[in-house]
Image: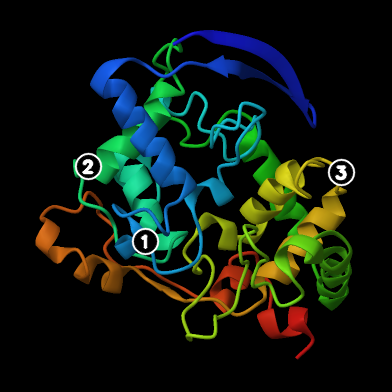
Amino acid sequence: MKLITTLTLIGCFAFAQSAELVYPEGEIGEMVKLGEAIIKNTDTHPLTKDLVNNKLKCVNCHLAGTDMHPGTSPSMGTFSGIAVRFPLYNKREKVVITLQDRIDNCFMRSLDGTRPIIDSEASIAMFTYITWLSTGKAIDINPATSKAPNFSKEIKKFTQIQKKASHKNFLNGKKVFEAKCVACHSANGEGIATFPPLWGKGTDGKWLSYNTGAGMSKLDKSAAWIQQNMPLGAGGSLSDQDAADVAIYINAQERAPFNLSEKIDAIKDQGYYNSKRLKEGDSVEANFKKLGLNFKTIRGN
């Protein structure tokens, strides 16, 4: 892989960003390309469409950089350098997980669907693509964290801001959404054309976006991601308060609840599920409660 790097500044962080990526030759290169195609078209790709239960694709959260490869945007959600941190201990699962575990588990939450079988063609392809984006980087297994460098600090910042939220912050979040987000995501959050839905149900009654177990449903994580990546092409332009408030507004909307037991039941014929946490239930109200917030008070109900 030929790699030419430029320095990109996002907020107060500097990242090395690829300016040219050349696919490997042979079968490895074909698997990299397949993984990239799945990540770009997860909800419609033949290998994964039956595993996705909403209208999202991996690339909706793992944005493309200037090279147009998904997951290379040098901000929260980047795939760059992620592969070298695995295997790692995952606090949520309470076990050491592989990169394939991490990818496949995302299908249950962000994609509100069914976990792919480990070592299936789709799972290996996505794993291969993400690993390719770490070519040349040294293995750096870090027992202290599963997050990309610097981002845990950003999440903690928003935790402190949002713990003080009131109904006024919900109303400000609505204003920010109407001013900055509606053009791409629509007033009802259902998305427009290739821009992804953020909440609600489609005309067929199916949920459109991530469920309440997804990382984006957590108020502080969502705010950190939004500030770094949105509005598209103008990431970093929202103030801390506006990013915190619009994350509150978006995640106060109706979305699919998450029940881990139901997700595990759907994959019981796959064999071993690598986790010691076999029960977990999340709801919109519960996600607010985690920051000490009363959902009805915040909504003004």
33 with respect to 261 (left or right): right
Gap between marks 2 and 1, in whole Å? 18 Å
Asked whether disc 3 touches disc 1, contact meaning CB atoms under 8 Å apart, the reply is no
265 with respect to 258 (left or right): left
Between 296 and 225, the one nearer to me in the picture: 225
Going from the N terminus, do you reach mark 3 or mark 1 first?
Answer: 1
Asked whether disc 2 touches disc 3, contact meaning CB atoms under 8 Å apart, the reply is no
179 with respect to 230 (left or right): right
Q: Amino acid at mark 2?
A: Glu
281 with respect to 208 (left or right): left
Q: Residues within 10 Å of mark 2 (few under 14, many from 20)?
A: some
Between 184 and 279, the one nearer to me in the picture: 184
Q: Amino acid at mark 3?
A: Ser
268 to 188, vertically: above or below: above
Asked whether disc 2 touches disc 1, contact meaning CB atoms under 8 Å apart, the reply is no
Q: Which residue bears the numbered disc 1?
A: 108
Q: Which residue bears the numbered disc 3?
A: 237
Q: Residue at x 48, y 85 (%)?
A: 204
Q: Which residue bears the numbered disc 2?
A: 121
**Residue 233 is drawn in which quadrant?**
top right
Q: Position of residue 39 (x, y in %)?
A: 44, 44
187 to 47, vertically: above or below: below
